Image (tube, grey):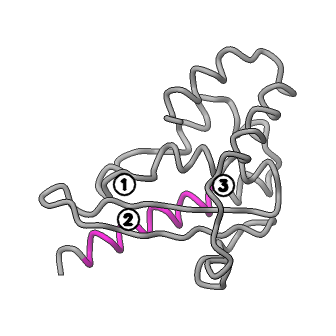
Amino acid sequence: MTIDEIIANFELLDEWDDRYRYVIELGRTLEPLPEEARNETNKVQGCASQVWLSTSARPNGAEGPVLHFVGDSDAHIVRGLIAILLAIYSEKPAKTILENDALAIFDQLALREHLTPQRSNGLRAMVERMRADARKALSLASA
């Protein structure tokens, strides 16, 4: 599912209970995270829940590396937040990841204002982790 489809679906839902259920449903669509990826290296620091993000990069010529993310959490709502982040960032060039502000999209969805402070901090930690992985992939590609 694309981020544009998610935004369009959000706009169809008037009640926040329905929007939360939708976010949880998005989390159920995540591709499974291999057990070996549930390690300290992939664990996202700064999240109240257990969150893992695994990143792989593939070269794409002049476009620079394209990143693929797989993630999981032990919290249903956080799994949904991961699904939205993957729609924004996964399978995108590292340069595009660094140019796109995922938090602005969460603000557009009015989702951040409905998250607890702990969840909001965790969301920022996940975004920063993905952006750091994009910066790392770019530096490795230019080395």
User: How far from the left and from the top, in percent, is residue 52?
Assistant: 65, 70
Q: Which residue is mark 2?
A: 134
**Residue placed at 68% from the left, 77% from the top?**
35
Answer whether labels 1 and 2 touch (C-beta < 8 Å). Answer: yes
Mark 3: amino acid: Leu
User: How far from the left and from the top, in percent, is residue 139?
Assistant: 26, 75
Mark 2, other Cα within 10 Å: few <14 / some 14–19 / many ≥20: many
In the image, residue 116 sits, relative to residue 133, either above or below, namely: above
1 or 2: tag closer to the N-terminus:
1
User: How far from the left and from the top, in percent, is residue 74?
Assistant: 81, 63
| Quadrant of the snapshot with the C terminus | bottom left
1 or 3: tag closer to the N-terminus:
1
* Residue 10 sits in quarter: top right
| Segment colored magenta | 124-140
Q: Secondary structure at mark 2?
A: helix
**Residue placed at 26% from the left, 78% from the top?**
140
2 or 3: tag closer to the N-terminus:
3
Mark 1: amino acid: Leu
User: How far from the left and from the top, in percent, is residue 133?
Assistant: 43, 69
* Residue 103 sits in quarter: top right
Mark 3, other Cα within 10 Å: few <14 / some 14–19 / many ≥20: many
Q: Is residue 103 left or right of residue 32?
A: left
In the image, residue 18 sits, relative to residue 78, either above or below, namely: above
Q: Which residue is mark 3?
A: 123
Q: Is residue 38 left or right of residue 141?
A: right
Q: Secondary structure at mark 1?
A: helix
Q: Is residue 41 left or right of residue 58?
A: right
Q: Which mark is residue 98?
A: 1
Name the residue furthest bottom.
Answer: 40
Q: Is residue 50 left or right of residue 3?
A: right
> Residue 53 or 98: which is nearer the viewer?
53
